[in-house]
């Protein structure tokens, strides 16, 4: 298994903070945010880490080189920033047909459970696992996606991107485990009419609609995705 870390975006809503650096290189408790995701890749005991870079790519490549811990690292450049699904598509070749752990480099997870997630993924019937977190503030769910699932076994029936009215307190994260067959659904993923790009929940929904077994996995106790100065502050005080 490999880890795919998406670190291509600038984070324009962070204004001057990202004028000279990629947003995943913003600091949280003295470390770059991307490092928490790289550590999660190590927890998952992957064979290789593939990092997709774009904006200020050199700051990431120069800092981390070709190894993180004892795991090899390779880089893929996303020349056009066209969303998460396009970023995944850019990395098809370096993933070399292997299953992979998807990580978004601007996410922070507290008490991550990637070892247990990988163990659950050993079930050959499972096509994908979506990492989720329970939240008290439903406004947080509106920022990512939520899942409608069978409460008995966690099987997901529907993913809802940025729901206006969340049906539950389950917030989806970008921490997902995929069989490599997820690439078969890239061409079938619809383009979001608001953002004009393909969205991760819609990609996964294509697999669900095709009968694939996709389950949720409670991945952490606290989570934030850093897109604004407010969220960066929330990251720093949220523990």
Image: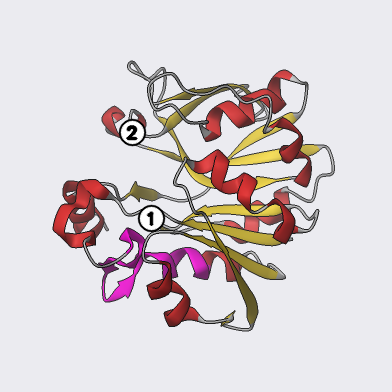
Q: Looking at the picture, does residue 121 appear above or below residue 54?
A: above
Nearest the viewer among 134 and 94 is 94
The quadrant of the rendering that contains the N terminus is bottom right
Q: Is residue 208 visible?
A: yes
Specify the label residue 143 is tagged with.
2
Q: Residues within 10 Å of mark 1 (few under 14, many from 20)?
A: many
Location of residue 162 by image quarter: top left
Relative to residue 61, is residue 21 depicted above or below?
above
- Residue 93: give x, y in percent of width and height: 73, 56
Residue at position x 51%, y 70% in the image: 39
Query: In this picture, which residue range is highlighted in magenta?
Result: 22-39
In which quadrant will I find the C terminus? Answer: bottom left
> In the picture provided, is 7 more to the left or to the right than 114?
left
Residue in the image at 42% along x and 65% along y: 34
Report the disc number at residue 106: 1
Depicted 166 relative to depicted 58: above or below: above
Question: Distance from label 2 to label 1 (Cα)?
Answer: 14 Å
């Amino acid at each position: 298994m490999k880890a795919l870390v998406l670190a291509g975006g600038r984070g324009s809503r962070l204004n001057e903070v990202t004028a000279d650096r990629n947003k995943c290189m913003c600091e949280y408790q003295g470390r770059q945010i991307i490092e928490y995701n790289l550590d999660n890749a190590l927890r998952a005991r992957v064979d290789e880490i593939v990092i997709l870079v774009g904006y200020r790519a050199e700051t990431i490549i120069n800092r981390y080189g070709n190894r993180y811990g004892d795991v090899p690292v390779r880089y893929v450049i996303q020349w056009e920033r066209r969303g998460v699904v396009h970023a995944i598509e850019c990395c098809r070749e370096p993933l070399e047909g292997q299953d992979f752990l998807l990580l978004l480099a601007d996410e922070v997870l507290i008490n991550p459970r990637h070892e247990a997630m990988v163990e659950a993924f050993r079930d050959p019937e499972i096509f994908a696992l979506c990492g989720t977190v329970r939240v008290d503030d439903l406004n947080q769910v509106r920022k990512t996606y939520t899942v409608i699932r069978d409460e008995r076994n966690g099987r997901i029936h529907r993913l809802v991107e940025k729901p206006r009215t969340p049906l539950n307190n389950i917030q989806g994260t970008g921490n997902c485990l995929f069989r490599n067959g997820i690439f078969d659904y890239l061409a079938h993923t619809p383009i979001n009419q608001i953002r004009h790009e393909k969205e991760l929940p819609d990609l996964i929904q294509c697999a669900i609609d095709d009968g694939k077994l996709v389950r949720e996995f409670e991945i952490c106790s606290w989570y934030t995705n850093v897109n604004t100065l407010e969220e960066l502050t929330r990251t720093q005080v949220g523990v």
